[in-house]
Image (cartoon, grey):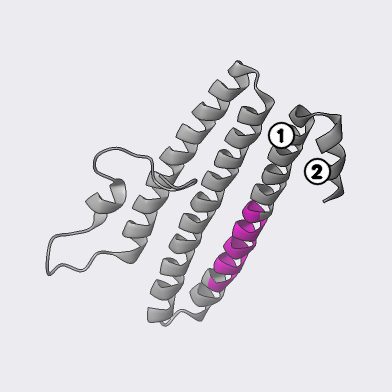
C-alpha cells in the first residue's frame, strides 16, 4: 500500500456511490464518498502514530507523522475534488454568484492541498533528523550539512 493511499479493507464508500452500468454517478456524491474513505485512512494513520509514540522509537514516531501528513494531503485532495465537482455543477446553473463562490472554494482548497504537502516535507525532514540523531556524532554533522 502506498503511503497516504487507501488502506481500507473490503468495499469502499466511493465504490458504493457509483451506480450500476448505464447510470451516471453524481460527481459530488462520488467525491464525498472518496472523502469519507480518505478520512477513514487518516484515522488509521493516527492510530499508527499513537502506537509508534507508545513504542518510544523516535524514528518510528517521525515516520508515523509522515504517514499522517500524507493522509492529510489525500484528504485535502479529496476535499478539492468535491469543490471542483461543486464548481462544475454551479457552472451548469445560471447563477453567477454560485460560480464565483465555487471558484473561491476551489482556490481555497488548492491552497490547503499545497499547505498539506509542505507539512509532509517538514515531517520528512524530521525523519531524517531523527535518523541522524541515532546515527551518532560523526554522521550527524554530515546529515545536517546537506
Give the dominant element type of the magenta stretch: helix, strand or loop.
Answer: helix
Hey, which quadrant is residue 92 in on the image? bottom left
Q: Which mark is residue 143?
A: 2
Q: Classify mark 2: helix, strand or loop.
A: helix
Of all residues, the one furthest to the front in this rendering is 138
Q: Taking 69 as reference, is 92 above or below it? A: below
Image coordinates of residue 52 in percent, x first then y, are 58, 24
Residue 13 lies, in percent from the top left, at 29, 47
Q: Is residue 133 left or right of residue 67?
A: right
Q: Which residues are magenta?
A: 103-117
Percent position of residue 36, x then y? 39, 45
Circle on res. 131: 1
Residue located 49% across and 46% down the image:
4
Q: Residue 70 location in percent, x, y?
A: 55, 47
- Residue 36, placed above or below residue 76: above
Residue 93 appears anywhere in the view: no
Q: Are marks 2 and 1 in contact (CB under 8 Å)?
A: yes
- Give the distance between the C-alpha atoms of the residues marked 2 and 1, in whole angstroms: 9 Å
Amino acid at each position: 500500500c502506498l503511503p497516504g493511499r487507501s488502506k481500507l479493507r473490503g468495499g469502499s464508500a466511493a465504490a458504493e456511490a457509483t451506480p450500476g452500468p448505464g447510470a451516471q454517478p453524481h460527481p459530488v456524491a462520488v467525491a464525498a464518498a472518496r472523502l469519507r474513505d480518505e478520512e477513514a485512512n487518516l484515522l488509521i494513520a493516527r492510530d499508527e502514530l499513537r502506537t509508534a509514540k507508545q513504542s518510544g522509537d523516535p524514528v518510528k514516531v517521525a515516520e508515523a507523522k509522515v504517514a499522517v501528513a500524507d493522509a492529510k494531503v489525500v484528504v485535502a485532495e479529496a476535499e478539492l475534488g468535491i469543490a471542483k465537482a461543486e464548481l462544475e455543477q454551479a457552472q451548469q446553473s445560471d447563477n453567477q454568484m454560485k460560480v464565483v463562490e465555487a471558484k473561491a472554494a476551489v482556490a481555497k482548497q488548492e491552497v490547503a492541498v499545497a499547505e498539506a504537502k509542505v507539512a509532509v516535507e517538514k515531517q520528512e525532514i524530521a525523519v531524517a533528523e531523527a535518523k541522524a540523531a541515532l546515527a551518532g556524532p560523526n554522521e550527524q554533522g554530515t546529515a545536517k550539512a546537506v
